[in-house]
Image (tube, coloured by chain):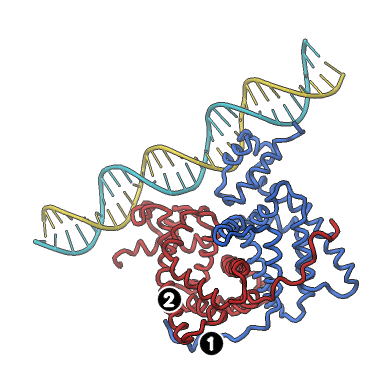
Chain colours: A blue, B red, C cyan, D yellow
DNA sequence: CGGTGCCTCAAACGTATGTTTCAAACAGAC
DNA sequence: GTCTGTTTGAAACATACGTTTGAGGCACCG
């Protein structure tokens, strides 16, 4: 076989199992037996379980962040001078994710699940790894968001970005299960692309909502 | 001391540790040593670690779902006949959560984190438990959402509800960390109530976004 | 053919986990 | 005080985990 088929088989199996069950809940023995590989191979090729987790992310994120940089370059070039709109920025990100070359038909959805888990599970080492390896495209995205929403205060913008991240990471992190439910309840098939097409308008509308609207005062309502 | 102080001390410690670190990452030994209680007490009083997790949720969710039912009753009564608006429905939920009697100052935020984790971590037993114990208020909330957004197709509404859940669960599930970051970066203090006050308009706007807007065709754009 | 580097394998190591055990301490009733 | 049922305590149990070990295989080069 190719020069290290084992490495890829481990990465494939790990990616899928991590996405299904989380990091702590996935043991090396599950991974190696799914990959049909010896247990010791993980520590031989990657050094540790944490390093394997990093490798799973790097395999996707490194080409993705390159694609994303290009998309942002194109976008800013097309807009020469004035800042891209919120919709343009969100679509640049979405398209970059959706059109990444994929190893299999569920590539994006699996990876979205992993990104959601990375944010949610406490895994300190992972957050540190992602921050120091991929801070550049992330900061650039944040800058574009800021320029696209000059009407928001810094605090409002901060929280709305968190809400966007949440809606995205959460939806994608359980999108297989959600798709199944949808298919059972409504008999509709849904692709990741279609979910993204529904998500982006939702995010854009939320991001641009009028300032804190009619909010019933918490203090004067009767206690239950 | 009271008739089983041990039980409450275990629940308090477990609640906090689970929220901080997740379920699998929190061992019974951490819980019992934080609660200053013997290790065997957990299995004596609760039967198993999973049952302890259920008890942590039940302690909050049972009174909360009663409060929520009352809030929905009040709301529908006030609206006699016509369905409550989206904003009213979201606020009824938010207020019920925010004004629940709390054991300590971080009560809600801790519990929101737990709910987020419940959805995110795979923990099949937990999802099953929550579904069969608290399906009634959940279904009612879904019905209210449906009546408040008659303009949406069933599929659109389904996905937008997922986006709302995601933004909420995700934000709340890391809200302490986010609050810390915000304080460091912008020097602003934020309470759960204030986060909710920012979240609801975001959700309402996203929920009522105009139908799928200008979406650059995925097929004609240049490949990166 | 002999040797050198890379890789695989089965087995074991040490540690941490959830759970069980059983004796001791305790509280309340008679 | 003595008995009874409930709760606590220290210790052990079995199991699963991540990691390490060292012998063996296999390909390549001289």
Taking the image as shown, residue A195 lies to the left or right of residue B139, namely right
Q: Please name the residue that numbered disc 1 is placed on.
A: A217
**Can residue B176 be seen here?**
no
> Closer to the camera, A11 or A92?
A92
Residue B114, percent across and down? 51, 64
A218 relative to A63, above or below: below
What residue is rendered at 70% in x and 63% in y? A196
Residue B35, percent across and down? 42, 60
Quadrant location of the N terminus of chain B in the rendered image? bottom left
In which quadrant of the rendered view does residue B190 lie? bottom right
Q: Chain of mark 1?
A: A
Q: Please name the residue that numbered disc 2 is placed on.
A: B69
What residue is rendered at 63% in x and 83% in y? A212
- Classify mark 2: residues with Cα within 10 Å, few (<14), some (14-19) or many (20+): many
Q: Secondary structure at mark 2?
A: helix
B8 relative to B29, above or below: below
Seen as rendered, the residue at the extreme front is: A187
Q: Chain of mark 2?
A: B
**Can residue B119 be seen here?**
yes
What residue is rendered at 41% in x and 57% in y? B52
Which numbered tag is attached to residue B126? Answer: none
Q: Secondary structure at mark 1?
A: loop
Q: How many numbered dots are placed on residues in this image? A: 2
Quadrant location of the C terminus of chain B in the rendered image? bottom right
Real-space Cα separation, disc 2 to disc 1, in angstroms: 20 Å
- Classify mark 1: residues with Cα within 10 Å, few (<14), some (14-19) or many (20+): few
Question: In front: mark 2 or mark 1?
Answer: 2
Taking the image as shown, residue B96 lies to the left or right of residue B165, namely left
């Amino acid at each position: 076989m190719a020069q290290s088929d084992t490495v890829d088989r481990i990465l494939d199996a790990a990616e899928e199992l991590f996405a299904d069950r989380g990091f702590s809940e996935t043991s090396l023995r599950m991974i190696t037996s799914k990959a049909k590989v010896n247990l010791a191979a993980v520590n031989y090729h990657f050094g540790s379980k944490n390093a394997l987790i990093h490798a799973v992310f790097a395999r996707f994120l490194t080409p993705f962040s390159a694609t994303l940089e290009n998309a942002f370059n194109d976008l800013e070039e097309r807009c020469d001078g004035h800042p891209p709109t919120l919709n343009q920025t969100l679509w640049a990100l979405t398209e970059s994710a959706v059109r990444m070359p994929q190893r299999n038909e569920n590539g994006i959805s699996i990876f979205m699940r992993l990104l959601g888990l990375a944010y949610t599970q406490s895994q300190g080492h992972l957050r540190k790894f992602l921050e120091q390896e991929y801070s550049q495209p992330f900061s650039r995205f944040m800058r574009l968001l800021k320029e696209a929403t000059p009407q928001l205060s810094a605090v409002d913008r901060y929280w709305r970005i968190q809400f966007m991240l949440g809606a995205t990471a959460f939806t994608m992190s359980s999108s297989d299960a959600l798709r199944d439910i949808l298919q059972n309840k409504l008999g509709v098939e849904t692709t990741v692309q279609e979910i993204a097409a529904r998500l982006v308008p939702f995010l854009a509308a939320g991001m641009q909502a009028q300032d804190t609207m009619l909010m019933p005062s918490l203090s004067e309502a009767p206690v239950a």
